[in-house]
Image (cartoon, rainbow, N blue to C red):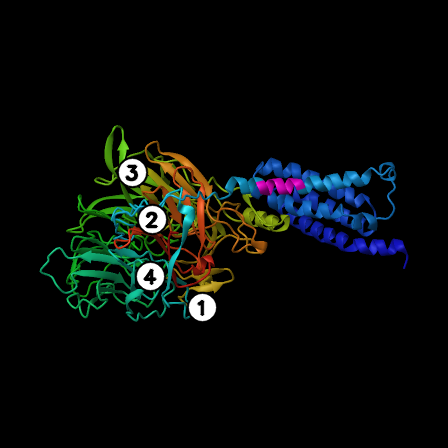
Amino acid sequence: MTDVMKRRLALWPLGILLVLIGLLLTGGGGWLALLGGSLYYLPTGLVCLLSGLLICRGNRLGLWLYLIVIAATLIWALAEVGLQFWLLLPRLGGPLVLGLYMMTPWVRHAFGPERTRAEQSGKARPRSRAVAAAAVALVLIGGAALTLHWGTGAAQSSDPLAPQAATNWSDYAGNKAGQRFSPASQITPSNVGRLKVAWTYRTGDLPKDPRQPQMFEATPLQIGDTLYLCTGHNIVIALDADTGKERWRHDPRVDAKGVYTLACRGVAYHQAADPAIKACRSRILVGTIDGRMIALDAQTGQRCQDFGRNGEISLHVGLGSVKPGVQFVTSPPTIMGNIAVVGGFVLDNMGVGNPSGVVRAFDVGSGRELWSWDAGRHDPNALLKPGETYVHGSPNAWSLFSADEKLGLVYIPTGNPSPDHFGGHRSADMDRYGSSVVALDIATGKLRWSFQTVHHDLWDYDVASQPVLVDMPLNGRTVPALVQATKQGEIFLLDRRTGRSLAPVEERPVPQGHVPGERYSPTQPVSLAFPSLVPPPLREADMWGATPVDQLWCRIAFRRLNYAGRFTPPSLDNGLIFPGNNGIMNWGSVAVDAERQLMIVPTSYMPLTLKLIPRKEAPATGEIVLDGRGAISPMSGTPYAVRTERPFVSPIGLPCNAPPWGRLTAIDLRTRQILWQRPLGTTADHAPLRIPVPGVFNQGGAMVTRGGVAFIGAAMDNYLRAFDLKSGRELWKGRLPAGGQALPMSYVSPRTGKQYVVIAAGGHAFMHTTIGDYVVAYSLQD
């Protein structure tokens, strides 16, 4: 074999690679062009194909053609996305790496003797080295700039720690206002870098069946020197607040049969005012995944025998026949005085016969039902007649409630009627309070006011975020306000006494659908209270990918989907729903520092695909059927089933929409302007080579402290992070043993005066974070 043939064979892998890339880009680019998309890919593919064929033949012109591709790609990429590093990277990264490889001596040598005058004079080698060096420098400078821009800067302090007065975290979000604020101030931006693990506790409640997802989403309560929390199987545990040592545990031995998601976000605490009460004077209430509410003595963990029968009541009374796993409780009851108010989770999209979403109040001491509020009844407070049940499929209230003790009101965020994506059967009563926040009189359950965030909701944009109460300066006076974050990205600002909006709300026209039997609201409300966190409508140029090939796949998929913005009506065609039912803001809600008049908002941006399936084409099982990366839900009793796929990703599993997929934003409540905004978390725990793309999907919420620090886990990487409330600078992060998809909390020990920050690290099955059973406490290093 001659030297020429050997050199040519050495070029074949490169040439064949370019031919394959060319074929993919040409075929996909032609398809995209026919769909009305970008014209970049088709000619690029043709040139890559020609370049690869020339290189296989040992023709140096193939190299020059590919350099033209790189130059054209650079111009096109800058025109599409500007200087956004993580958007440029998939467009330029692969082509530049391949271009750098072509500049290497062994590739150049494979083409044989250099023939140009410049090459003969010895000038080509320095030139090629200069080009390669410049390209490498560009990559390094970009990476360095990214590190400098988003890098951490934990400030260190050697100041001695002063003991602080003890604090309590007596409600899920720290207080009944839902503010997620701790008055603890020992940890500050200047010393947070000294946080270390103080203790770790393991609950022992790990998933027993891989087909049954489990999420350890609990936020502990802290009362005095004791923490109280619950696990996915509703095991209630009391821990020593300084050591994490277990004091007692109560296992209710729940029946988890059929339960789709094992989750318990927390427990509730009640202290009897009457000193004559001896047994169970302080008690813990917990709702269970098999439809019970249990009362436990906070000191011993024993059941309170005066509560119902053997310390428990059934929450299935009045619901009719309840199929296991379709209706249960995931959030703690809200207690005001001697009244505990509780709602319930109802499994999405099963059908019109789903159990009612009724909200009920019970006497904390006896367990006796005091009132009910069923959003599907013409008179929501009407008593049930013998043999009657609450309205099937009525809007439920699965998330966290808030309460104003002075006004005597409890604030309920509601879901949409069942099922989610078809509403042709819904009555006016069913639609009236769906996807709303309602204020009920705590003593009677009577409606004081309601505010609807989505009309005739067909997108599962139920109100998942806990209402947050804050007294706000407005036009020279202080107004008792309610901040309501929503899945579709709106944040409404209401007078919590009346429900009247404190800022303009516009009713804007939205797209109308054409599904037989359905009806559509002509408008949807848009809040002008705060700067919008709603992303602009997706475009083809927003499609992302690790390489030009999977980005091309996402562009084609996007062009083929039915998409008309965030209120794209569900249809018989594949549609794109953005933000989708995970929402921009979910049960993590927002955190408020009322003293600084500052609001911290975690957001996520992850679309999904959705398609209605005519009943005759749908599976006849009446159950949820897994279908590739999606699932088909029956929506029994309607003309359609529904297929959802989440999220909208490329064939290699990367999101098709561009990063960041998650952010943390601070809003000044006085000016109602954004103070700072930054990506939250990175892809390092999931991406190949641990590439840290900033800004990932998050679930769990932020907590703020009087010390001026915001703490949040929530992201898809296993870290608890601390941010400066003033600047948004990341000050510290602590590695967690599992995903931190829970709200962190903080308190000051009454024994030691030491401030702790505590988070449940148990992971989230749907987010594919590390699963565990850990409770981790941090404190400042002595």
Distance from Cα at disc 2 to Cα at disc 1? 28 Å
Mark toward the start of the polypeptide (1 vs 4): 1
Mark toward the start of the polypeptide (3 vs 2): 2
Taking the image as drawn, is residue 360 in sight?
no
Type of amino acid at the residue the image marks with label 1? Pro
* The residue stretch that appears in magenta: 137-144
Q: Residue 461: where, in percent of width, then height?
A: 37, 49
Q: Which residue is denoted by mark 2 in the rendering? A: 465
Q: Which residue is denoted by mark 3 in the rendering? A: 595
Q: Which residue is denoted by mark 4 in the rendering? A: 244
Distance from Cα at disc 2 to Cα at disc 4? 30 Å
- Residue 709: quarter of image: top left
Secondary element at tag 2: loop
Mark toward the start of the polypeptide (1 vs 3): 1
Mark toward the start of the polypeptide (2 vs 4): 4
* Circle 2/circle 4 CB separation < 8 Å: no
Type of amino acid at the residue the image marks with label 4? Gly
Mark toward the start of the polypeptide (2 vs 1): 1
Residue 141 magenta-drawn? yes
Secondary element at tag 3: loop
Distance from Cα at disc 3 to Cα at disc 2? 22 Å
Q: Which residue is denoted by mark 1 in the rendering? A: 210
* Circle 1/circle 4 CB separation < 8 Å: no
Residue 220 image label: none
Type of amino acid at the residue the image marks with label 2? Ser
Residue at the location (30% across, 60% down)? 229
Taking the image as drawn, is residue 2 in sight?
yes
Distance from Cα at disc 1 to Cα at disc 3? 45 Å
Type of amino acid at the residue the image marks with label 3? Glu
Q: Which of marks 2 and 4 is in front?
A: 4
Front residue of this view, candidates 391 and 100: 100
Q: Residue 758: where, in percent of width, then height?
A: 35, 54
